[in-house]
Amino acid sequence: MKYTALLFLLCLLACKNDPTEQQASGTPELPGGFAEFYQKFHSDSLFQVAHIVFPLEGLPNNADSATVASKDFRWLPETWRMQRQFDFEVSEYQREIVPLTETIVMERIVHSTGEFGMVRRFAIVGGEWHLIYYAGVNRLSK
């Protein structure tokens, strides 16, 4: 059962987007307004909290198999910590951002060793972008 959490996260992170859907620069075409939202989301704490659908579905950092199996973990405003944008040019993390539809974007951030990663999903809710899912940093099985 302990490996269920790792298998779940590995499955999420193993899915790769179709390279034919990427722009010439090698990055996927993001839906309108998402890039601006993403920038403000990581620089303004009040904006960030206002653009999260609480109670937020997801997984805590270092989730155990019981938490994964219960599927009832939720992030709450009282325990939320401001998320800052990574500088992927100098960090040991790599990002894959995948527009699933015009209104849903999935982001995977994985350490260069492939041992740790996180997943976030953003969607348009009520006409604005919001964070709708966050699986914190967890160990990934190899």
Image (spheres, helix red, strand yellow):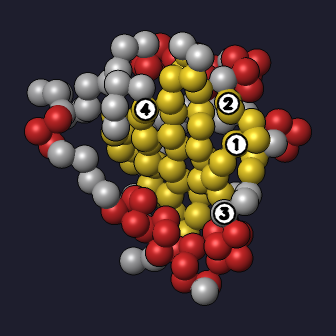
Q: Which mark is residue 52?
A: 2
Mark nearer the N terminus (3 vs 1): 1
Q: Which residue is mark 1?
A: 56
The answer to whether residue 17 of the structure is visible from this angle is yes
Looking at the rendering, in which quadrant would you find the N terminus? bottom right
Which of discs 2 and 3 lies nearer the camera? The answer is 3
Q: Amino acid at mark 3?
A: Lys
Q: CA distance from mark 3 to mark 1?
A: 12 Å
The percent coordinates of residue 91 (x first, y second) are 47, 45
Q: CA distance from mark 1 to mark 4?
A: 16 Å
- Per the image, label 1 sits on a secondary structure element best described as strand
Point 64% across, 69% down: residue: 68
Circle 4 residues within 10 Å: few <14, some 14–19, many ≥20: many
Mark nearer the N terminus (2 vs 3): 2
Q: Which residue is mark 3?
A: 71
- Would you say the residues marked 2 and 4 are in contact, meaning their CB atoms lie under 8 Å apart? no
- Per the image, label 4 sits on a secondary structure element best described as strand
Point 17% across, 35% down: residue: 21
Q: Is residue 19 above or below residue 68?
A: above
Q: Which residue is mark 4?
A: 104
- Per the image, label 2 sits on a secondary structure element best described as strand
- Would you say the residues marked 3 and 1 are in contact, meaning their CB atoms lie under 8 Å apart? no
Camera-side residue of 120 and 96: 120
